[in-house]
Image (cartoon, rainbow, N blue to C red):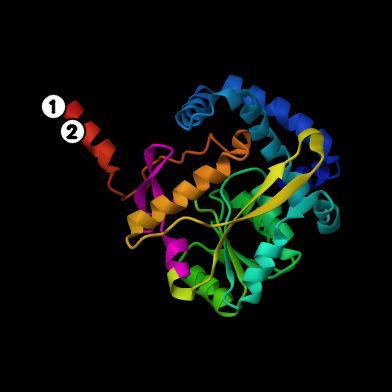
Amino acid sequence: MLVFLFRLLSYLPLPALHSLGAAAGRLVYLASPSYRQRLRENIARAGYLQHLPAAIAASGKGMFELPFIWCASPKRVLRTARIENWDLVQAALDGGRGVIFLTPHLGCFEIAAQTVAARASLTVLYRPPRKSALKPLVEGARARQNLILAPTNLSGVRVLLKALKNGQAIGLLPDQVPQHGEGVWADFFGKPAYTMTLSAKLHAISGAPIILSYAERLSWGRGYVIRFVAFEETLGDTPQQQARAINIAMEKLIARCPSQYIWSYNRYKTPRGVEPAPAAAEDASGDRA
């Protein structure tokens, strides 16, 4: 049923889907206190509270554009995307060590992967959805030509390393909360967030350059601009330094279009089995006193 609904919605023009999504985003914001609180807290912490109305609408657009991005024909989807700075990517690919794309939950990150895959082989780290009913839809939509899915386990890491060894590109969501043992605590907009260490490890092993990417959603359903930005931070020697450097890069990227970041994402949660962040642990001990 869900697959049928997505395919049906995919026939709608993108401006219509974004209009419906903006309205739905406002409705969900009003109807869900927990969603509203998290979104407001996260965007205020980052200093972008003035972008709240646009962020509420953008969150709905991000949901309603998925049927189009996932189920419309690749040719139709790619017509909505315009690329900037591809020469940066091509130069890195020509170096023969592959490319590590870091793409946060900013704008339409789904179309960014499809756009790259239309020009070069891309392997992306993929966490299967918790609901089994969504698995055929998500995997079928994402696994397109030149777009390879690598699971979030040891075998998936081997797939990523193999792609880099072959001089190909890989993609990661650096602001996705990793599982136990796969991250460290590092500040993100002034609060500790459990942050993945995989991208820095892959860079150290392969020597592949890191490139930031995001797809800015244009107004009135006019499509997307996929932008590539050089990673300019110093990673440092320790996992904590490396995670913080990547979070700084993400903060700078989000500043380019802050209303399009998914502020409702539970970025600061403590994964099961992970010790709480140092600041959180101190606060808890103080409360018990």
Question: Could you say which disc has been placed on residue 285 in the image?
Answer: 2
Across and down, in percent, residue 219 comes to 77, 34
**246 vs 63: above or below:** below
Amino acid type, mark 1: Ala
What secondary structure is found at the residue carrying circle 1? loop
Residue 96 appears in the picture as rendered: yes
Q: Nearer the viewer, residue 7 or 195?
A: 195
In the orientation shown, which residue stands out farthest toward the left?
289
Q: Residues within 10 Å of mark 2 (few under 14, many from 20)?
A: few
Q: Residue at x 76, y 64 (%)?
A: 118
Question: Could you say which disc has been placed on residue 229 in the image?
Answer: none
Magenta region: which residues? Answer: 176-203
Across and down, in percent, residue 37 comes to 48, 24
Q: For residue 89, which quarter of the picture?
A: bottom right
Across and down, in percent, residue 32 comes to 55, 24
Across and down, in percent, residue 200 comes to 44, 63
Q: Residue at x 86, y 44 (%)?
A: 11
Q: Residues within 10 Å of mark 1 (few under 14, many from 20)?
A: few
Question: Could you say which disc has been placed on residue 289 in the image?
Answer: 1
Q: Are marks 1 and 2 in contact (CB under 8 Å)?
A: yes
Q: Nearer the viewer, residue 53 or 250?
A: 250
Q: Residue at x 62, y 28 (%)?
A: 56
Q: CA distance from mark 1 to mark 2?
A: 6 Å
Q: Nearer the viewer, residue 216 or 198?
A: 216
Q: Is residue 136 left or right of residue 129?
A: right
Amino acid type, mark 2: Ser
Q: Is residue 57 left or right of residue 162?
A: right
